[in-house]
Image (cartoon, rainbow, N blue to C red):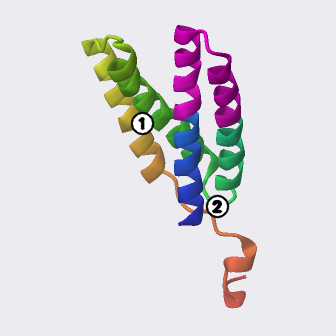
Amino acid sequence: MRYWILLGLAIFAEVIGTLCLKWANHNESPAGYGVMMVMISLSYILLTFSVKKIALGVAYAMWEGIGIVLITLFSVWLFKESLSPAKVIGLLTLITGIVLIKFGTTRSVKAEEVPHAAR
C-alpha cells in the first residue's frame, strides 16, 4: 500500500509542477518556475521509489495518464482552456488504456517467494 501512496504523491507533485509552469508563464513569476522545478523533481523521485513494488509499466502509465487527465481538467478550470469532444474522447481512451495496463499486468514471482518443494 505504501508504494501506491508514493505513486499518488508523485502524480500530485507532477500535476502541481506542470500547473505551476503554466501559471508562472501567465504571470511572469520566477517563483512559479522554482515551485515547478521542485515539484517535478519531487515527482520523479517519488516515482522512483514507487516502482520498487509496482510494475514499471503500470506505475508510469498511471503517473503519466492520470497526470494528463488531471492537468487537462485543471487547465480547463483554472486557465479557461477549451475541452473539445476530441479531447474528451482522448482522455477516455487514455483512462481505458491505464485500466487495461493495470489489470493486464500479473505480479511476477521471485525465486525466493516460490515454495522450496516447487523448485
Amino acid type at circle 1 is Gly
As for residue 19 lying within the magenta part, the answer is yes
| Disc 2, SS | loop
Residue 116 lies in the magenta-colored region: no
Residue 47 in the image, given as x and y percentages of width and height: 65, 46
Query: What's the mark number on residue 70?
Result: none
**Residue sitting at x 45%, y 37%:** 66
Is 25 left or right of 65, judged from the image as shown? right
Query: Residue at the location (70% across, 70% down)?
Result: 110
Q: Between tags 1 and 2, which lies in front?
A: 2
Residue 114: which quarter of the image? bottom right
Q: Does 37 sit above or below residue 26?
A: below
Q: Identify the element where label 1 is drawn.
A: helix
Q: Mostly what secondary structure, the magenta segment?
A: helix
- In magenta, the rendered stretch is 15-40
Residue 31 vertical position relative to residue 64 in the rendered view, above or below: above
Q: Are marks 1 and 2 in contact (CB under 8 Å)?
A: no
Gap in Å between the C-alphas at discs 1 and 2?
Answer: 21 Å
Q: Earlier in the sequence, mark 1 or mark 2?
A: 2
Please provide percent x and percent y for residue 10. Answer: 59, 44
Q: Dot 2: few (<14), some (14–19), or many (≥20) neighbours within 10 Å? A: few
Query: Residue at point 59% right, 55% down?
Result: 6
In front of the other: 53 or 112: 53
Residue at 68% across, 17% down:
30
Please give the residue where the numbered disc 1 appears in the rendered image. 97
Circle 1 residues within 10 Å: few <14, some 14–19, many ≥20: some
Three-letter code for the amino acid on which mark 2 is drawn: Lys
User: Could you say which quadrant of the image residue 119 lies in?
Assistant: bottom right
Location of mark 2 (residue)? 53
Residue nearest the viewer, comparing 85 with 24: 24
**Relative image position of residue 99 (x, y in whole percent):** 40, 44
